[in-house]
Amino acid sequence: MTTLLTTRDIAHIVSAHGLPVVLRRMEAAITAGFRRWQDFDKTARVASHSADGVIELMPIADDTHYAFKYVNGHPKNTRAGLPTVMAFGVLADVATGTPELVSELTLTTAMRTAATSVMAARALARPGSRTMALIGNGAQSEFQALAFHHLLGIQHIRAFDTDASAMSKLQRHLAGVPGLTVTLHTSTAEAVRGADIVTTVTADKCNATILTPAMIEPGMHLNAVGGDCPGKTELHPGVLATAQVFVEYEPQSRVEGDLQQMPADFAVTELWRVLAGQAGGRRDAAAVTVFDSVGFALEDYAALRLMRELAQKLGLGTPVDLIPLLADPKDLFSQLVPAVPQRLAA
């Protein structure tokens, strides 16, 4: 039998443990995966682009589990009452190919993306960072803000979005979080002024320049989360040109990230090397660091395994007959035999 985890199951997990605990467990699981980077069979995701968005498959495997995520990105979906990003994932046993888990990944992706951002900032941002500018206040924004607050000690969010209602939503959801203040700003330039960390999580599928060189201050760490497919960027090339740039999986980031704007020989460092102690991170307190994050399948692999573990301990998940249960594994046709005579008679 295959276990199905629904959005209600994921919400139950978060309710039972508390979001800070789940985010902390998520960061730890993703970090552990990156530190054993060499154990995985990796490939860039497969994308199908259309005029209004993109649909992608993100596969990865080690010698125990194969995982993939189906995910879309359609910025115009909100006009139809649909999320911009929707996702589900599968975790299968490598030895037999049996799909062990099918899970929602829309909520889970928001948490794993926030946890990945924190993981990068923990390795790259200046110690003691307390202020973060959050540019783009849509569906991902609360997860980013709360992850940075609970896991990295951010105390002040400086928020900006071109949609005033999105800013109000963010402020409403974060009101009353102990130790966290949120201020709304009238422009990106105003919001990033004086910030230790800047996180951009915008949705438009275009070559945007959300951050320009004039906005960047010495010592900033930038999480560029929104630029995640060809033709979609957030940073002016000049920002990258003078920064230390870190990526998840370079072959994928060269095509999809803000890095797509740079020459093929522009130097970047894969983040796993920093986490594994094979490469240095921030050079000094004045350096500008950029995590050009596009999302990588290893993060979903870690998230699927974690959610399955947490669900099992809470008795969550629905067994489903995704694969036929056969008395004789060579006799697949027997699954249809009771129905065949009736259909022929009709």
Image (tube, helix red, strand yellow):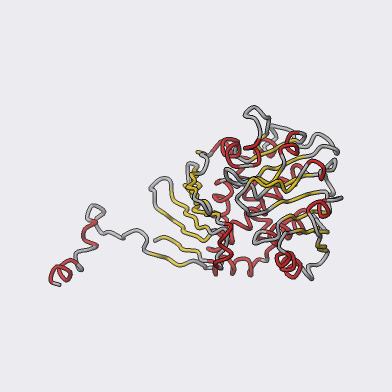
Report the quarter where the C terminus lies: bottom left
Return the residue nearer the eye: 285 or 54. 54
Q: Is residue 301 visible to the viewer in this orientation of the structure?
A: yes
Q: Residue at x 81, y 67 (%)?
A: 178
Taking the view exactly as shown, the residue that stands out farthest to the top is: 265
The number of numbered badges drawn on the structure is 0
Return the residue nearer the eye: 114 or 194. 194
In the image, 263: left or right of 87?
right
Q: Residue at x 85, y 51 (%)?
A: 193
User: x, y (%) of residue 190?
Assistant: 83, 54
Q: Residue at x 64, y 53 (%)?
A: 113
Q: Is residue 180 visible to the viewer in this orientation of the structure?
A: no
Q: Is residue 218 above or below residue 324?
A: above
Q: Residue at x 58, y 64 (%)?
A: 78
Q: Is residue 222 above or below residue 174?
A: above
Return the residue nearer the eye: 219 or 30. 219
Image quadrant assignment for residue 33: top right
User: x, y (%) of residue 239?
Assistant: 75, 39
